[in-house]
Amino acid sequence: IVLDHEGYVSDDSNDPGGLTKYGISSRAYPELDVSELTQDEAIAIYEKDYWDKMQAQYLPPKLRLLVFDCAVNQGVTRAAMFLQRACGASADGVIGPRTLFLMKEFTPEFLIDSIARQRLQAYIRNPKWTSYGSGWVTRLLDITLRCLLHP
């Protein structure tokens, strides 16, 4: 699903990430030839640098996609802080045992709502809002609805 939103090559001069493919930017991965990146390589990067860092395997299934997508689109630290704020943990940007423990006190729906609101607020404050806001909101709505409708 994230690849559906990220799975194209982009070299937008307004994008500070530079050349991007599958959501993997040349700025974040200067050692890679992003233009030659395969989908399997992108998935391996997603798993190691986003999914695992978000401790996604320990999140409620309904919440995993929203947190993972946030990490890919808005950064791992920011995604972690959004989850931490939602569950009242110290917002240090690293998902650890305390965050995972506190998270269990809330319904997945509550956490989805809180994180989605924080994501939207961060998008609106982003200086690139006028250029990319419509796409960001479309993505956020798609991901949020998928999470809420997940059994």
Image (tube, rainbow, N blue to C red):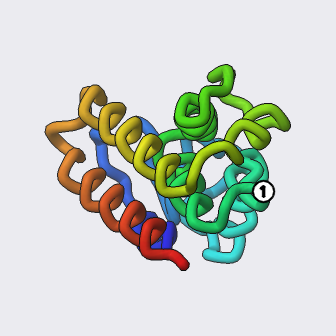
**Quick one: 73 or 16, which is closer to the camera?**
73
Residue at (41% x, 48% y) in the render: 113
Question: Which element is circle 1 on?
Answer: helix
Q: Is residue 11 left or right of residue 53?
A: left
* Spot occupied by residue 31 in the image (x, y as percentages of width and height): 71, 46
Q: How many marks?
A: 1
Check disc 1: other Cα within 10 Å, few if <14, some if 14-19, many if 20+. Answer: few
**Quick one: 107 or 113, which is closer to the camera?**
107
Seen as rendered, the residue at the extreme left is: 130
Seen as rendered, the residue at the extreme right is: 97
Residue at (31% x, 33% y) in the render: 121
Residue at (61% x, 60% y) in the render: 64
Vertical side of 49 occupied by 85: above or below? above
**Quick one: 26 or 96, which is closer to the camera?**
96
* Spot occupied by residue 109 in the image (x, y as percentages of width and height): 48, 56
Disc 1: which residue: 58
Q: Amino acid at mark 1?
A: Tyr
Q: Is residue 24 left or right of residue 50?
A: left
Can residue 8 be seen?
A: no
* Spot occupied by residue 97 in the image (x, y as percentages of width and height): 84, 37
**Quick one: 63 or 108, which is closer to the camera?**
108
Residue at (55% x, 29% y) in the render: 85
Residue 151: name its quadrant.
bottom right
Vertical side of 58 occupied by 95: above or below? above
Can residue 34 be seen?
A: yes
Q: Is residue 67 left or right of residue 97?
A: left
